[in-house]
Amino acid sequence: MSQERAIHRDVGPMALMYTGLGSIIGSGWLFGAWNAAKLAGPGAVWAWVLGAAIIMTIALTYAELGAMFPESGGMVRYGHYSHGSLVGFIAGWANWIAIVSVIPIEAEASVQYMSGWQWQWAQDLYHKAPGQHGELSHLGLGFAAVLVVVYFLLNFWSVKLFARSNSVITIIKMVIPAATGVALIASGFHSENFSVGANGGHHANDFAAILTAVATAGIVFSFNGFQSPVNLAGEARNPGRSIPFAIIGAIVIATVIYVLLQIAFLGAVPPDMLTKAGWHGIDFSSPFAELAIIVNLNWLAILLYADAFVSPSGTGMTYTASTARMIYGMERNGTLPKIFGMVHPKWGVPRPAMWLNLVVSFLFLFFFRGWDSLAAVISVATIISYLTGPVSVMTLRRTAPELHRPFRLVGLPIIAGIAFIMSAELLYWAKWPLTGEIILLMVVALPVYLYYQYKSGWHEFGKQMKGAWWLVFYLITLALVSRVGSTKFGGLGYLPYGWDLAVVAVIGLVFYVWGVKSGWRTPSVEAAQLEARIDPDAPLVPPDEENAERITGR
């Protein structure tokens, strides 16, 4: 029995949607509305709507891919199928960095919320730093480490246990945020708050601030949870129906909840708190809970402090499952040791991959000790990981049109083009120097890729590079444009605001066309087609890199 066949397909469409929703509604709902308001003031409402629309276009491209190739860790495999090993490696590395670091962040979020409790020991868990990112104390880190271990153990013994516990937690996570929004609005809604700017004075929508909020305030970070149903596609029953249902349903429901919460937050803050420095001067460690206490909703504060464990923990558990499947997928790409592709024959989970992610989670936990310090970094790494989906799905329509597609997205060329262009815009909105720093982070892992190419005797290395030049030059170009762009996005100001957004859109369109034309019919796709002829009813799951080359003789 192959390792892929050892994966258990036990997750139904509702459980899969709960997985996506459980990932989206994590610590982002506890901190996102506050962060977005600090950046964009009342314009934060539009930031959530715009962010959801952008993510939906990107997610739809992955819905077709996930239904087409229902395998564990699929998000790190699609670029490999369409463009070869280097594109697959860069996309996989960006995706893994963005997702694995969420596990400790969710644990940190729970502990940071605890610091709002009235007891001194709880308040000592987190130290505020005025004007800077706060961080957890040593005791706080200890609590967070215990939570990371709990996430690990709940995933260690089968996907069924994970799916059942996550479904219950997600239902709770839907009810409490919605109840919070309604309760805050009912307690006293100050409509005059919507006329106060982010830095005080009269509010006028600052489009640049709204765009930056989308990229860095935790909005992209929150909606990134749509990936979980894709990465767990290998465990899904009827993936052609389950995956699109799970992705679309999770994003729509989460958008309604997040917009409600943002409106409630903006309207519930006492107006006198905005007189000094506007929304930028609101400094909370436990935003909604502290706000509930201020407006005398003590019962809600107690509920929120309890939910600060439930919401982030549900997301932490989901991402623990997803990241293990991603490492499993990267091993199948031929760029990690084979031990990480081992799946437990009884429990159906890739345990060695889970152990690796546990170690990396601890490293992130102890090097980045506050929610704020990692949220923006994760968001930008996430944006880079989005780039390959729209290009890969269009390339595979061209290079492998005969492959069965249980879900075929109508209007794909237009939707995929918009998704790629908006990914480029998101990367630019994140502001220099963060954009350049995260692009540089993509280079750090290249020696690992080169090592495995060396081990393979540089097999078809020229073809791999030909399929990847578009992505290499794209990242370099975006870094340069970010550096010389308008001052509103951290650049030197050589490109005026407005024109810079148009330039980025044109760059996105050019590289989208180049990327689609650079794809080729890889051994993985060829092998999948050959296996489909032998067993037409089996899920279309390409073999790992070594077996693909053996089957195709390439």
Image (tube, helix red, strand yellow):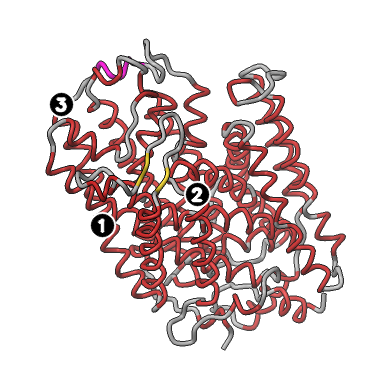
**Mark 3 surroundings within 10 Å by alpha-carbon count, few (fewer than 14), some (14 through 19), many (20 or more):** some
Q: Which residue is mark 2?
A: 368
For marks 3 and 1, give the one nearer the viewer. 3
Tell me the amino acid under the disc marked 3: Gly
* Earlier sequence position, callout 2 versus callout 3: 3
CB of mark 2 within 8 Å of CB of mark 3?
A: no
Q: Point out residue 519 in the picture as x, y percentages from the top left corner.
A: 75, 55
Mark 2 or mark 1, whichever is nearer to me: 2
The residue lying toward the viewer, choosing from 102 and 242, is 102
Q: Main secondary structure of the magenta part?
A: helix
Residue under pointer 3: 188
- Range of residues picked out in magenta: 191-196
For mark 2, give the secondary structure: loop
> In the image, 378: left or right of 551?
left
The reply to whether callout 3 and callout 1 are in contact (CB within 8 Å) is no
Residue beneath disc 1: 171
Q: Residue at x 77, y 81 (%)?
A: 550
